[in-house]
Amino acid sequence: MSGGVRHLYVHLPFCAARCGYCDFVTLVGREGEHEPYVEALLAELALERSSLDRELDTIFLGGGTPTYTAPRALERLLAALPPAREVTVEANPETVTPRLAALLRRAGVTRVSLGVQSFQPHLLHALERRADAAAVRTAFHALRDAGFDNISLDLIYGVPGQSASDLAHDLDDAIALAPEHLSCYELESKPGTRFAHAHGDELARQAEAMEGYFEQVVETLTHAGYRWYETANFCRGGVAAGGRDLRSRHNLAYWLGRDYLGLGIGAVSTVGGVRWRNAPKLAAYVAAARAGRVPPREVEPLDDDVRRRERLLLGLRLDEPLPLHGVESALDAGALARLERLGLAERRGSGLTLTRRGRFLGGGVTAELIA
């Protein structure tokens, strides 16, 4: 008997180095622990297999740097995962070689998300990134040569030392590679981190420029033919892409409120109205797997009100109307009427969407709509 979950996230935490701004669950080096960790992942998958459907829509390997994982362990993991229509692997450019690209392709990966962040040397230095622009282009072409026709590039803006001109160069360099998908994120630096301490004043200056950067990203990429389908995400589509839907199907599952299973340290799952987060400790995770137990977890039941609010907050990030059936009680009718008069939100049939102007204001508009 199988469950109905059709989306699987797998966390591979290992990295060559930890970037100063990163707040994900990561571990530097630990080469000798890659294979035991994959063994533990597969043990957790076996314990949770009954919650998954027989056929999956998406699998996403995130990190960390999944492609820093020892090739033999990574190949074993990919071979053991259930088949899925979309299989995405995150990669840092310096880890992508022709051999690795061929391994991913042979193992059934259909999509690679390349962590570029910037093409500008001074910004890469500020971000403590190892790959330069030449390494990005080399990695991209290695993936193309291996047969990948669905590549996403990640960019960050609001970096210490960045100007609007720097961002324009980054966008132009990314567009020149003609990836199928681009994710463009505001830099977030948690207070108290060494990155915030080192760049505090400059980060405050950059925060004032974020709105302008955001508009610059949207205008540039939509003018280049990309669809602004989610607040920070853009894709090719339609005739230019052979009619393919090149949105990230895995991330769409999150934004549409679908259930998903997460494996690995720090991974989050939402299944059947319950959310749990695995503890971020590697030793405890591996020990639990060897003992045949689920790893230590924090468990949070989600009541209907929370789920409706999350559905609104996430669904209104998309460019398609959010069906209102089932979430009406989370909506402030008075606020909606006011925002419609202001041209920030509009109803389309039985759905709700933010206007282009409303999408630029984003979370502030959505927060007003929540009852």
Image (cartoon, grey):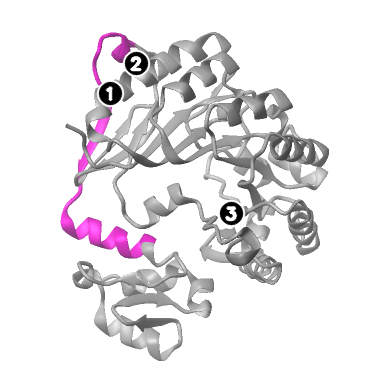
Image quadrant occupied by the N terminus: top left
For the C terminus, the image quarter is: bottom left
Percent across and percent down for residue 317 are 44, 64
Disc 1 vs disc 2: Cβ atoms closer than 8 Å? yes
- Type of residue at label 1? Pro
- Percent position (x, y) of residue 301? 18, 44
Give 155 or 25, whichever is nearer the viewer: 155
Nearer-N-terminus badge (3/1): 3
**Mark 3 residue element:** strand
Query: For mark 3, what is the residue?
Result: 185
**Quarter-wise, where is residue 204 in the image?**
bottom right
* Image height of 340 relative to 79, above or below: below
Judging depth in this view, the residue of 351 and 144 nearest the camera is 144
Q: Position of residue 128 (x, y in %)?
A: 70, 35
Residue drawn where x is 40% and y is 14% of the image? 39
Question: Which x, y percent locates residue 252?
Answer: 42, 54
Q: Residue furthest bottom?
A: 341
Q: Residues within 10 Å of mark 3 (few under 14, many from 20)?
A: some
Amino acid type at circle 2 is Ala
Amino acid type, callout 3: Tyr
Cα separation between marks 3 and 1: 31 Å
Span of residues in magenta: 287-314
Q: Which residue is mark 2?
A: 284
The correct choice, above or below, for 77 with respect to 137 in the image is: above
Q: Is residue 19 left or right of residue 263?
A: right
Q: Is residue 249 left or right of residue 69?
A: left
Q: Residues within 10 Å of mark 1 (few under 14, many from 20)?
A: some
